[in-house]
Image: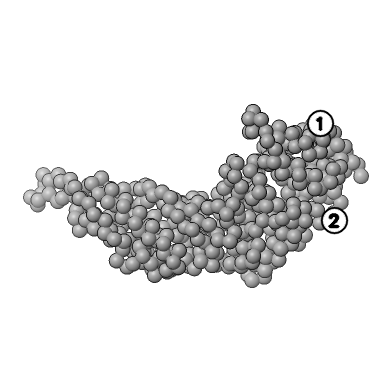
Amino acid sequence: MTAAVVLVTATAVGLGACTAGGAPRATGSLPVAPAASSPYSSRPATTDIDPEGWADVRARAVTEVLEARVADLGRRDETGWLAALSGPASGPLRATQAAVFERMGAMGAGDLRLVTVRETTPPVPAPRGTQVEWDVKASLTYRLLGFDTAPRSFDLDLTFKADPTRPADLVITASAPSGRPQPWDLPGLVVRREATSLVLAVGTADRVEEVMRRARTAESRVAAVWGEARPAVWVVPATDADAARLLGRSADDLAGVAAATDGPLTPGEHAGADRIVLVPGAWSSLRPDGRDVVMTHELTHVTVRAVTTRSVPVWLSEGFAELVAYQAIHLPEATVVAPALDRVRSSGLPQTLPADTDFDPGTHALPAAYGLSLLALRTLADRYGTPAAVRLYRAAAGGLVLPTSQLDDREAAVDDALGSVMGSTRSALLQAWQARIRRDLMP
């Protein structure tokens, strides 16, 4: 299943200076606004520094500190990474940031880039010599070296503190992911790396080893059908709630889902930073062969997305992933697609292939849609051969030159591929598919 929040834990990436003294001092004038004198006091008015007056120098100081922290990760300089963390929570913050630094290094997180910095809460007016706090949202990108061929983005919410007259001496007092956490935010994360699999798991050594072993099985099964398998990143959180946060989804969306593929996908480009997230609850309920099916299914998505450039209808995407996943599983077809057959018994023979909306998370039609899609792909593979089904997918997902009017019409692309690859039509596929459903209903 393809996917695509709140912080999982207090562990988060905070960005700081490379030395204890902070980044180089930014310069600039600091206009001040006089505070009104109180009619009830004979004491002279204080002079507050207007936040607008030092906004530019404050922004430069923040950017310098964040860029220094980016460089610290690249140099593997933990001292610099921790230098700018301060405040009442500096002890816990430094401890969690030291753990994040270690996890990022173990994962191979690199090519960290600061993209944008935006102040979300400005400091309040304050007299000279008073330290004030303000909030910033920083957007960054990174790659997992050896696995990602494209950058992946993430956001941080950071709180800075400084004396307005000495903005270059700012410190970080709080940090948390803004939206989705990253795998390095998971406490207890264990990292296992092989040439074609990176497993990022929370759990026992046996659990980590099982995922790595099944990743190898999935790789061989995908390669046997598609011709190759893409190196993959497998993320195994401790709880379903953690999985939902990593995916930017609600727990209800993941009901009954054992795994999901998530990553940025730009039309016309290959996916290059996918993550396969296992959902512990549903995953643990599966038998061993079911776990292999799930992992093979998701690795099919990752592999296909890495070498194609155009989206296809969901029935083709999910049906093909199911075709590959069940290729080595010897079960009666009626057993594999039982929810689909139940749906046909209650609602009648479908007249069209499953719509994209049938695959929406939380819909009761989801299990049936998967089964019906698998039957469509098996219908094609049995008649024209599995290699022809692969060629059909490749053609529909970018291998065909389409008229401009059809570029956004995914079903039209499939129709063209049916004709060019198999010399067939959608009408012929529907008739053969319906006949197969009837056969499975009455074995």
Q: Amino acid at mark 2?
A: His
Give the quadrant of residue 108.
Answer: bottom right
Residue at the image position 41 percent from the left and 62 percent from the top: 71
Answer with left or right where residue 369 lies relative to residue 61: right
* Residue 264, x across and y down, in percent: 57, 48
Residue at the image position 67 percent from the left and 65 percent from the top: 212
* Residue 171, x across and y down, in percent: 32, 61
* Residue tagged 1: 427
Whether residue 325 appears in this view of the structure is: no
Q: Amino acid at mark 1?
A: Ser
* Residue 285, x across and y down, in percent: 71, 58
Residue at the image position 78 percent from the left and 34 percent from the top: 419
Name the secondary structure under disc 1.
Answer: helix
**Disc assigned to residue 330:** 2
> Given the current orientation, which residue lies at the most extreme left position?
42
Residue at the image position 36 percent from the left and 65 percent from the top: 18
Whether residue 331 appears in this view of the structure is: yes
Name the secondary structure under disc 2.
Answer: loop
Give the quadrant of residue 131.
Answer: bottom left
